[in-house]
Amino acid sequence: MRVFLTVDIDVYYSGDFDLEARGYGKGVDHIIAVANDHGVPVTFFVDIMGATRWGVKPVRELCRYIQSEGHEVQMHLHPVVAQIDNFTDQQDTFWREDLATQTRLIRIGMEMFDACGVENVVAFRAGALAANVDSLRAMQANNLYMSSNRDLDQKSSIASQLNDHFAVRNDAAAWEGIVDLPVNVLRSPIPWADGPYRHLEICALGSLEMKDALRRMAGAGYAAATILTHPREFFYRTRSGTAYIQKNCRRLESLIRLLGNDSRLSACPISAWKRDDALPMVSPPELRLHPLHSLMRLIGQIEYRVRRKFFLNPQPFDPVKVEA
Ligand SMILES: [Zn+2]
């Protein structure tokens, strides 16, 4: 089974990339350091609208760093961050824009990546996965053929409009030549706490859940597993800088160690998927997380929230958040 470890990079508070994306060494840099230790490639979906608001320079520097470490950059896009002529967005929901506007935003994104020296952009992920069929058409118009915009988990403010649009659910599938790699879900054994599904995100699944999920997906014949994370899942802001979120750092380490060692799991960058690669014909079986693993995660989460509230004193990223 191919496994795609994907990181969405959003910079929408102050334009301070060293803080918001890199966490003074504890964000993007930390992910890359752990990945490189185990030879695991990572795909970074960089919000290219940042280049229109904060300038090309910081985005170029970030992309150069990612690529110089052997990882790849693909397009992420939060319309609320865009600062371009004759366009404003208050809702940050890409699918609310009409086809012409979606096409224009992606085209500007491609021009910005060009200015940042990023080549081989083939994939697109809308902010909060808020994509619809027009988004796929806008991708076609810009020669992008890889998508990662489905996610059946409706709890994490995921806004995808594409879940019922592909013949195969919860695995790689194509629509008119565009291949979508969904952020995969498993059924939660504790729906009263989680909702029906839990998706493959570092902050959503404990280490045991993630490892067990990937092994069982491989065993059940899934073609691809796509995992989502963000730099800010690994650090918080303190009065003097940043500090690690140890719980999530342990999860990342354990996941990447598994990807580096388990021969059934082939970690790839998204561009490794070629246009004519074979796709599954039917939806794979829906899997359920192990109840004991999920309960352990829930207890750990409650413990972390209490500690965060009473002892960690995280500082906000404000004050200049873009109007949302
Ligand atoms: Zn995002």
Image (tube, helix red, strand yellow):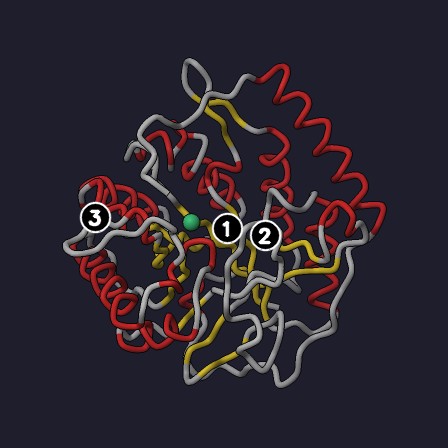
Label 2 environment density (alpha carbons within 10 Å; few <14, some 14–19, many ≥20): some
Q: Is label 1's Cβ within 8 Å of ligand 1?
A: no
User: In the drawing, does residue 317 fall left or right of residue 208?
Assistant: left
Residue 82 x, y percent position in the rendering = 25, 50
> Pointers 1 and 2 in contact (CB under 8 A)?
yes
Q: Which structural element holds mark 1?
A: loop
Rendered image quadrant of residue 220: bottom right
**Front disc: 3 or 2:** 3
Give the residue at mark 3. Answer: 83
Which comes before the other along the chain, label 1 or label 3? 1
Q: Which structural element holds mark 3?
A: loop
The amino acid type found where label 2 is placed reads Gly
Give the residue at mark 2. Answer: 260
Cα distance in 3D space between marks 1 and 3 = 37 Å
Label 1 environment density (alpha carbons within 10 Å; few <14, some 14–19, many ≥20): some
Which comes before the other along the chain, label 3 or label 2? 3
The amino acid type found where label 3 is placed reads Gln
Residue 107 x, y percent position in the rendering = 22, 65
As rendered, which of 90 and 159 lies closer to the eye? 90
User: In the drawing, does residue 211 fall left or right of residue 27?
Assistant: right
Give the residue at mark 1. Answer: 39
User: In the drawing, does residue 274 fall left or right of residue 47?
Assistant: right
Quarter placement of the C terminus = top left
As rendered, which of 146 and 95 lies closer to the eye? 95
